[in-house]
Amino acid sequence: MDADELILISVDDHIAEPPDMFDRHVPARYKDQAPRVVEESDGVQQWYYGEVRGRNLGLNAVAGKPPEFFNIDANRYEEMRPGCYDVRQRVQDMNAGGQLAGLNFPNWTGFSGQVLNQGPDPHVNDIMIRAYNDWHIDEWCGAYPDRFIPCGLLPLFDADLAAKELRRLAAKGCHAVTFSENPEALGMPSIHSRAWDPLFAAAVDVGTVLCCHVGSSSRTFHTTQDAPPSVAMTLSSVSSILTLADLIWCDAFQRFPDLTFSLTEGDIGWIPYFLWRAEHVLDRHHGWTGHTFPEGIDGPADVFRRNILCCFIKEPIWLANLEKFNIDNVCWESDFPHSDGTWPEAPEVLSGILQGLGDERIDRITHGNAMRHYQFDPFAHRSRDDCRVGALRAASPNVDTVTRVGRPADDRDLAAWAKISARVAANR
């Protein structure tokens, strides 16, 4: 399919949340406890929730910059393109990149809202999580309902509260929520306990997907403290591998056969091998492990094909093992404005990767699967032809896709990476 004819819906983009996002959504009596942006001593801008420091902007806001301008250290809002934090500018950037719509994960809160879950007062945490969700759904997504798939945060410190918030979000039209790739790493129950059953039941009842984003357990994989940064960047998919292993052996699917998880930003070419390995484990070790599967499910590979969504940015390796995937559960991700994204050339990159699949399967991967799983229908707002890459680019022909602010990468970024590595080593 020609790049201009594609319809692109990403299941993984991000927001560098604007500093005023809580102003209209936190009750007056809690305003003084709301998260805020602080300018630190070195001049960077950083979110804080009480004493809890939020996640850096850094590589999470580099769209339009050449790699020589990618920074690890947190930066400032004026050092990124406005489309990272301004919804109207974001839509213009989406047009320039030929992207119809996207599911937007949080950024400074951590990808499963860890920071907002870590405050000392659970009641206040719940209020701030609800405020985040109302801003995200009512202001960010609500400004352009045909362009954004809402994605909510949950009070994961309490499964019953999380189920209640998931149902509230579904009533607002949100059918994607962040869930940790490994809750136990955050001091919460593991998915192999029954502690999450209230949340799982709610998700099944309203058809909401639990999204497990890389890094949503606050873990970073380092082989050694002194390994060069490229080692950890190469191993970025490791946490998704661990999540897949947990999910395909999780007995929650016996109680909730329609429960759906997604694996986000971990690539997918590695999946067929680990499915083979899991089937081998079932064959050779079932006698003593005693693991059983839901009725109609023959093994872990079936669990993957039925209950787990996956996505890719530009990685082509998975296509060599296409038959190992359920094509109805494979989606595309843009990852804007993160450093792995392909904006604004995604249509050209993607059409090259998917050539030969046929238009019908390409349509499922590029937009149809996302629409079905997340109950999102942009065609209710605009014609199909107006959703295509060529039409969107024609609607915003003068967008400058080069980000002309920021600073060149230097020793400051390597020093920031060394600090991250040291913190990881200290927590081992």
Image (spheres, grey):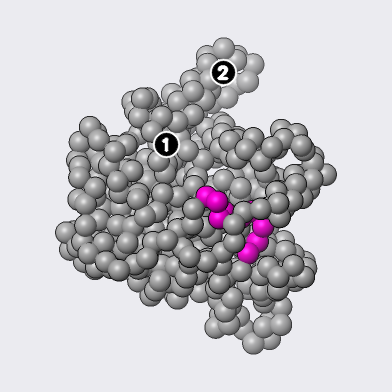
Q: What residue is pinned by disc 1?
A: 315
Sequence-first tag of 2 and 1: 2
Q: Going 53% across and 22% down the picture, which residue do you hit?
A: 278
Give the extent of the magenta segment.
67-75
Q: Nearer the viewer, residue 153 or 311?
A: 311
**Quarter in which the N terminus is drawn:** top left
> Circle 2 sits on which residue?
281
Question: Within the magenta stretch, is there residue 70?
Answer: yes
Q: Are marks 2 and 1 in contact (CB under 8 Å)?
A: no
Q: Amino acid at mark 1?
A: Glu
User: Residue 13, relative to residue 222: is it above or below?
Assistant: below
Q: Count the marks: how many?
A: 2
Q: Is residue 409 visible?
A: yes
Quadrant showing the C terminus: top right
Q: Position of residue 332 (x, y in %)?
A: 37, 46
Residue 250 image position (x, y, % from top left): 56, 35
Tell me the element at label 1.
loop
Residue in the foreground of this view, choosing between 91 and 379: 91
Q: Position of residue 395 (x, y in %)?
A: 24, 68
Dot 1 crowding, Cα within 10 Å, few <14, some 14–19, many 20+: some
Can residue 112 be seen in this snapshot? no
